[in-house]
Amino acid sequence: MQNDMVAIIAANPKYQRLVKTRSSYGWLLTAIMMVVYYGYIAIIAFDKELLARRLGEGVMTVGIPVGFGVIVFTIIITGIYVRRANSEFDALTREIVKESGK
């Protein structure tokens, strides 16, 4: 019985679309995050002077707001994924569960 249900769900075109869409979207956002994060680390590694420049007369350097921006970007990109997951992906999951329960 359990194997039959798994086979029914796996054969559902909506399930296949859900898996493909969610996976590709997740990998896209992961790639974007990696570019931002490793780009920041690469700048630290290869051009320390760029991020060490002072902003004004105080102790604030360019690296501090850029690093803060990386953190904020992480929060934003997580929110973007959660918003799509809670709307599109969850709705599709409910449809799949409803159809497989017949």
Image (spheres, rainbow, N blue to C red):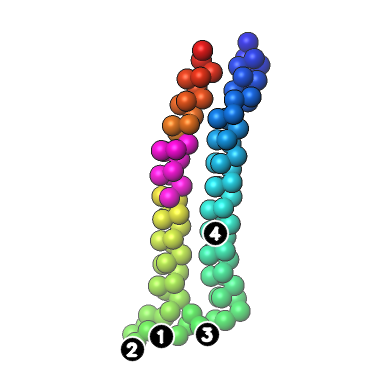
Q: Mark 3 highlights which residue? A: 49
- Rendered position, 98 above or below 49: above
Give residue 75's position: percent from left, percent from top: 42, 55
- Mark toward the start of the polypeptide (2 vs 3): 3
User: Could you tell me residue 94's position as x and y percent?
Assistant: 45, 26
- The segment highlighted magenta reads 80-89
Amino acid marked by disc 4? Ile
Three-letter amino acid code at disc 3?
A: Glu
Marked residue nearer the N-terminal end (2 or 4): 4
- Whether residues under marks 1 and 2 lie with C-beta atoms below 8 angstroms apart, the answer is yes
Q: Which residue is mark 1?
A: 54
Q: Rounded to the nearest whole Å, what is the CA distance between mark 1 and mark 2? A: 7 Å
**SS for dot 2:** loop
Q: Residue furthest left?
A: 57
Residue placed at 60% from the left, 39% from the top? 20
Residue in the foreground of this view, choosing between 13 and 63: 13
Distance in Å between CA atoms under marks 3 and 4: 25 Å
- Whether the residues at callouts 2 and 4 have beta carbons within 8 Å, the answer is no
